[in-house]
Amino acid sequence: MLRFTIPGMTCGGCAASVRKALGTVEGVESVAIDLPSRSVEVAGRPAPAAVTHALTAAGFEPQGLPAA
C-alpha cells in the first residue's frame, strides 16, 4: 500500500482526475481518497515512479511517495 498527499487536490473534480490517473497504473488494485486531508491510499503493488508519472501527467504533484 502507498500513502501520500496531493496538496493541489482541492475539489471533487480533482479527486476524480486523480482516481482516473491512478486507474491507468499497473499494479493499482484500489484507490481511497480523503479530500479534506488531501491524502491518497493506493492498494496493490504499483511502482512509486509509475504513480508519480501518472499523477504528474494529470497535473498533480504527489508528496510523500518513496523515491524510485
Image: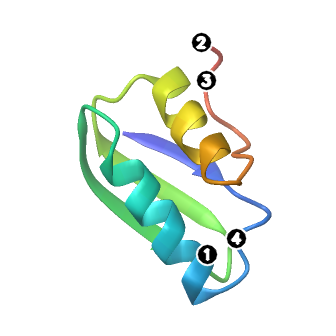
Q: Amino acid at mark 2?
A: Ala
Residue 20 is situated, as x and y percent measured from the top left of the image, at: 39, 62
- Disc sitting over residue 66 in the figure: 3
Q: Hey, which quadrant is residue 10 in on the image?
A: bottom right
Depth order, front residue of 53/2: 53
Crowd tier of the residue under label 1, counting other residues whose Cα lies within 10 Å: few below 14, some 14–19, many 20 or above:
some
Residue at x 34%, y 29% (from the top left corner):
46
Q: Which residue is mark 4?
A: 9
- Disc sitting over residue 14 in the figure: 1
Q: Secondary structure at mark 3?
A: loop
Question: How far apart, in angstroms, are the residues tagged by discs 4 and 3?
Answer: 19 Å
Q: Hey, which quadrant is residue 26 in on the image?
A: top left
Residue 35 is situated, as x and y percent measured from the top left of the image, at: 60, 79
Residue 18 is situated, as x and y percent measured from the top left of the image, at: 52, 62
The mark closer to the camera, 4 or 3, is 4
Crowd tier of the residue under label 2, counting other residues whose Cα lies within 10 Å: few below 14, some 14–19, many 20 or above:
few
Residue at x 24%, y 32% (from the top left corner):
27
Residue 2 vs residue 52: left or right? left
Residue 31 vs residue 60: left or right? left
The mark closer to the camera, 1 or 2, is 1
Q: Which residue is mark 2?
A: 68
Crowd tier of the residue under label 3, counting other residues whose Cα lies within 10 Å: few below 14, some 14–19, many 20 or above:
few
> Is the N terminus in the top left, top right, bottom left or bottom right quadrant?
top left
Q: Secondary structure at mark 1?
A: helix
